[in-house]
Structures are given as structure tokens and as C-alpha cells.
Amino acid sequence: MTQRWRNWAGNQRTRPIRTVRARDTGDVVDAVRRAAEQGLRVRPLGSGHSFTGIGVPDGVALAVPADPAGLRCDGALVTVPAGVTLHTLNRWLWARGRALPNLGDIDAQTVAVAISTGTHGTGAGYRGIADAVRGLLLVDGTGTVHTLDTTREPDLFDLARVGLGALGVIVEVTLETVPAFHLHARESARPLAEVLDGLDALAAAHDHVEFYWFPHTTTAVLKTNDRTGATGPRRSRAAALVGDELLGNGAFGLVQRVAAVAPPLAPRLNRVMAGQMAAGEYVAPSYAVFCSPRRVRFLEMEYAVPRAALGEAFAGLRAAAARHAADVAFPVEVRVLGGDDIALSTAYGRDTAYLAVHVHARRPHEAYFGAVESVLSALDGRPHWGKLHTRTAEQLRPRYPRFDAFVTARDRLDPEGRFRNPYLDRVLGVPCTSTT
């Protein structure tokens, strides 16, 4: 028996039959073929930061190559072992004068899982991390190795950039980088109505815009990040400690504990936190601004809606929070992103607004998330693949014009369902010919 597996939030747990640690492509091929001989399923492991069951290994848990010694740069292109984390990659690139053009707000994910689940960040003129993919090395369900790019199996490459781990095990990812850049970060508490009314203008005026709203308040914490040639004002180590650790994690964790034992205090606590989380302005390397430490465990649901529907979506979310989030002391996060052409990207074919709701990991979430999901799904919303939702293949198919092309590729690459798990069966459907 192997050790139990659990995700970061603790809401997904299992005990895989065995865990295999692959050092290279050959080890991955061997693991897949041996599992096939024994009739077992295989699930590549990330760092456990998905809230859904997308990464749950119920057979062979396969730790993919993760040695940073395998990182290599060729001009603007960087080739990364699939299990290397964004945290490691960001600093390795910075030391060589390069950076990724956009990032999400945590860097604990492995590179392969970040692209496979559609991790996206914010910025009306930017796209998610998978848009930077220029090549993939992938092992399919038969143990066959595929080298994918725009010239070698281009149709499969196109689908596999956001592949949910359903098409095969990613061994390496090649990403296009940009010259390293600093960001000028500004954070301020603003009236919610002002931010909502001016969001289009803000998104046009700044490279990266997002805001947080604490339920039961009329305040938004607005964050804008802009590329700059300046190197100051810098954020002192003391300010970073206060902002990220004391307020962002320490005090925030205390607020969650108080709200759990005294739910009626949650609205008052939210009003206090909304004013305290705004942290002035500073300039820092891009990755240090995009990403922040997250030590307070939570559950999250996020939906992507057409950007034009943001106003209606937020109004519906706010009404749902008024009914079902009386004791919730976690903020709602709102971001915007440019559309892309990746088949299962939540931003496929349209400029997109993202709305994310959170609760403490040990608090009930079903009523709140369910009410928000009802609102956002009705607006042609697409759920984030790695964040909690209840959608099925039948419900998702109309939201993705190339859904059936993806499923056809899955059935061809994984004819015995080697990479299936219950979550993928729900969101992609069960292959008719699968024997596992």
C-alpha cells in the first residue's frame, strides 16, 4: 500500500495503488505500459492545487519528471520538465533575463498542470499561460511518445495545450517567453460601484486589472499592474511581510477562525478586511507581483463568462451571496482576459471575465457555490477545470465548439481509458469502447 494522497485544500483524498516517480520519458512509457498490462489507470501528479477531482489518482500515481537540471533555453523558447513548478521556473527565467508574459496568482502549480487546467491570470490584452505553449512531449495511453508542435501533429498539438490530462502524460513543455520585466503594482480600496462602472476604462488603461469584493460590503480592493522600466518604489521586506504574511495570511486566517465560531460577525469582519488589504504601490519583478503566498486553505469555484456579461454576472453573484454567504469571510475575485483559440480554454473564442468565489476549506460551500453557479452558468459560463463545479459533459459540450474534436482525440490516444478518472468521466463523458 502506498501513502494516502490529498490535494492542497484537503477536499480530495485517495490511496493510489502505487506511486511511480519518473525521471525521464522512458520511465513514463514504462509506467504507462506496465499499468496497461495490469489493467490499471494512471494519473500524472501535480502539486495538488486543483479543487476538483481532475488530478485524483485512483490507480497508479505518476510523478512526472521534475528535475530543474532539465530546464533549457533556446532564445525566447524554454523547455521545461513537466513537474517543475512555476515558482522554480519563474526564478530560473529571471536569472536569464526572461519571463512568462502572464501568470496566475499562485506559483505552486507544476507547469504541466497549470497549462492543462487553463490557469490564466488577468489582463484584457493578454491570454492564459497555455497560449505561450510552443511544443509538448506527450505519452499516450498505449505508451507511444508524441512530439507535438505547429508542424508535427499540429491538430493534436492544438488540442493538447489545455488537455485536462485526458490525452496523455505530458513529459516536457516548451514555452515562449518575453524579456524580463518589472510591474508597477497599485492596490487601493475603492467604492464598489465606482470600480464596476469604470472597469472597462481601467482594463483599457492598465496591463493587468482585477478586484476583490468582500460579501456584504460596498468596497472593492482594486489591483492594477503595469509594465514599467522603473525599478522603484520598491516594497520593503517589512512591507512585504505585513502585506503578504501578517494581513494576507496571518490576520486573514484569524478572521476565518472568528467567522467560523461567530458567523454573525462575518459582515463586520469583511468591512474591516476590505479596508486593510489595500497595500499601496510598489515596483517588483513580474513574478513577484503576479504571485502571492496562499497559506489559508480554502475551496474555490470560478466561472468564465463573456466579458460583456460581467455586469449582469456580478449582480447575480452579489444577490446569491446576500442569500447564502452570510457567514463567508472570503472575498470574490474578478478578472478579465483576452480571448484565445485553444479548444478547451475557458477563454476560447471570446474576451472573458472571470468571477471566483471562495470559502474556508472547513466551511460548507454547497448552497453558496450552487447559487452562484446557477447564475453564471445561465450566462453561457464555463467553469474552471480545476475549481469546484457540478457541470457534466452534456452541459459543457454546447459551451465549447470543439468539444467533440477533443473527445475524439481522447478516444484515439487513450483507447482503453488509461487516463480516466471519475471527474474526467463526468466532464468529458465515458468512452463507449473503454475497457478500464
Image: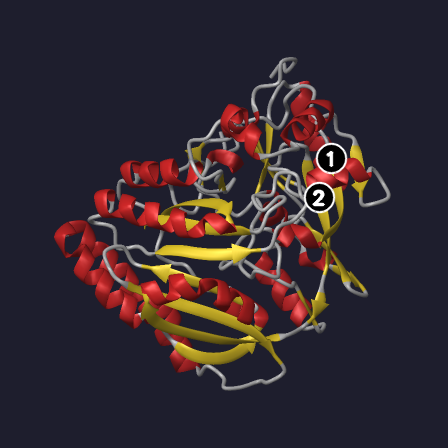
Give the image location of residue 379, x and y in percent.
45, 39
Kind of residue at badge 2: Val
Task: Using a 10 Å C-alpha cutoff, classify the residue at mark 2 as few (fewer than 14 neighbours), some (14 to 19) or many (20 or more).
Answer: many
SS class, disc 1: strand
Work out whether residue 320 can be spotted.
yes
- Residue occupying image coordinates x 78% and y 36%: 155
Kind of residue at badge 1: Val
Between residues 313 and 77, which one lies in front from this camera angle? 313
Work out whether residue 206 can be spotted.
no
Give the image location of residue 92, x and y in percent.
66, 66
In the rendered view of the protein, which quadrant contains the C terminus?
Answer: top right
- Residue occupying image coordinates x 33% and y 56%: 331
Residue, disc 2: 171
Give the image location of residue 219, x and y in percent.
29, 65
Q: On the picture, is 273 further left or further right than 24?
A: left
Give the image location of residue 87, x and y in percent.
57, 61
- Residue occupying image coordinates x 24% and y 42%: 324
Q: On the picture, is 413 further left or further right than 4?
A: right
Between residues 256 and 32, which one lies in front from this camera angle? 256
Task: Using a 10 Å C-alpha cutoff, classify the residue at mark 1 as few (fewer than 14 neighbours), some (14 to 19) or many (20 or more).
Answer: many
Q: On the picture, is 384 further left or further right than 365?
A: right
Between residues 417 and 402, which one lies in front from this camera angle? 402
* Circles 1 and 2: CB atoms closer than 8 Å: yes
SS class, disc 2: strand
Between residues 217 and 423, which one lies in front from this camera angle? 217
Residue, disc 1: 139
Q: Quadrant of residue 86?
A: bottom right
Q: CA distance from mark 1 to mark 2?
A: 7 Å
- How is the rendered protein coloured? secondary structure
- Residue occupying image coordinates x 59% and y 45%: 113
Which residue of the protein is positioned furthest toward the right in this rendering?
151
